[in-house]
Amino acid sequence: MNREIYITDYNCVTPLGFDVESNWNALLEGKSGVALHKIIDNHEAFFVSKIDSEKLEEEFNKNFDNQNFTRLEKMFLLSLKPLVERHSISDDTSFILSTTKGNISLLKNETTLPEGIYLSKLAQKLADFFGFKTKPIVVSNACVSGVMAISVAKNMIQAGQYKDAFVVAGDEISEFVISGFNSFQAIGSEPCKPYDKNRNGINLGEATASVYISSELHQNEKFKFKVLGDSAINDANHISGPSRTGDGLFASVQNAMKEAKVSSDQIDFISAHGTATLYNDEMEAIAFNRMNLQNVPLNSMKGYYGHCLGASGLLESIISMESALKNTLIPSKNFEEMGVSQDLNIIKENQSAEIKYILKTASGFGGCNAAIVLEKC
């Protein structure tokens, strides 16, 4: 019999705040981190969700003396520090890093590859700082990385390879990432509107998020969420475009719910990917309807945080769990009129709700899809 796996602690660093409480309060007030920022020299400004660098430095200096870190590494350290202080690290503790691009900004104006550009080196640097004793694990699977990192931790602990795990996810706004998405003509010219009829593309964002996952519970846990089921399916549809029939996401959700032994009627809330691109939103709507989930309250957090790449899945999972703890559903920001062909129950305003079972999904380039089912205990 598989042992039960729990998330018992989490933290995040975003444009809306440097801890979960400040983020939650900002979300309740409908605040968004998305604003116009100049990212590329000699180019127009883009709508992105970007952390104020001066505030980041100020917060980092309050907590750390060592300055030998990149901007992204400082975001990672700030996110992880409270969890490391509250939980012990043993020989059986795993350290898992989720990111899509890592320190990609180091490549600018460089003729040789700096060591910090390698994701394995980035993970080891963070692990060494906090004194982790096992070899770090890097999860870099496009935009499903944050959700996949939870799955990796769950399955490795269940397999007996580790007793617990610290999972940290993050990416930052960079010229490289902006240029890439801009080449796809996928970036919106206004704050993004997931699932809305008038949506015209994504906003990119940056954040770091951390969770502590364990099979062993202690009396002082403030909360616990059981990771009931997980799945990742690649539909291999296209290098950047999602399956038109939602095959990969449908199969991921189906598998995760089957493992969780939870029916469509039992799911209380869906934290969806919701990038505000035409094809992604439509694909999700089709997949959710195929699973008879069209009536379940659903939101996308992209209108508040933008698309934070490798951080999105983990950050949005944290906000979902906070919603369950607070018995409050947060609206899908900027949604006004249905813009997909299938019915969805898009949350339009803050509302009270009893949330026990959460479905979190993510999809990404290369046809990757992932889903997890969480239970509030």
Image (spheres, rainbow, N blue to C red):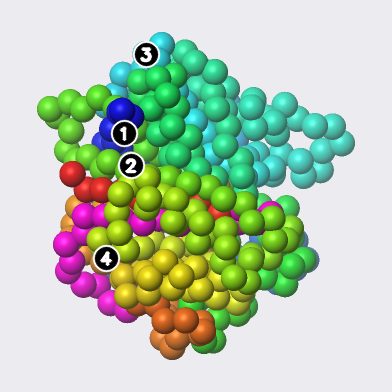
The residue mark sitting in front, 1 or 3, is: 1
Q: Amino acid at mark 1?
A: Ile
Quick one: SS at disc 2?
Answer: strand
Quick one: SS at disc 1?
Answer: loop
Magenta residues, start to end: 346-368
Q: For residue 121, which quarter of the picture? A: top right
Q: Which residue is mark 1?
A: 5
Quick one: SS at disc 4?
Answer: helix
- In the image, is residue 251 part of the stretch drawn in magenta? no
Query: Depth check: 328 or 346 in front?
Result: 346
Q: Amino acid at mark 3?
A: Ser
Question: Which numbered tag is attached to residue 90?
Answer: 3
Disc 1 residue crowd, few under 14, some 14–19, many 20+, Cα 10 Å: many
Q: Is residue 297 visible?
A: yes
| 7 w.r.t. 176: above or below | above
Q: Residue at x 26, y 43 (%)?
A: 225
- In the picture, which quadrant includes the C terminus? top left
Is 227 displayed left or right of 280 in the figure? Answer: left
Q: Which residue is mark 4?
A: 265
Q: Residue at x 45, y 39 (%)?
A: 151
Gap between marks 4 and 3, in whole Å?
40 Å
Q: Earlier in the sequence, mark 4 or mark 2?
A: 2
Q: Amino acid at mark 2?
A: Val
Q: Residue at x 56, y 66 (%)?
A: 246
Q: Which residue is mark 2?
A: 227
Q: Earlier in the sequence, mark 1 or mark 3?
A: 1
x then y, percent, for residue 166: 40, 30
x then y, percent, for residue 341: 51, 84
The residue mark sitting in front, 4 or 3, is: 4
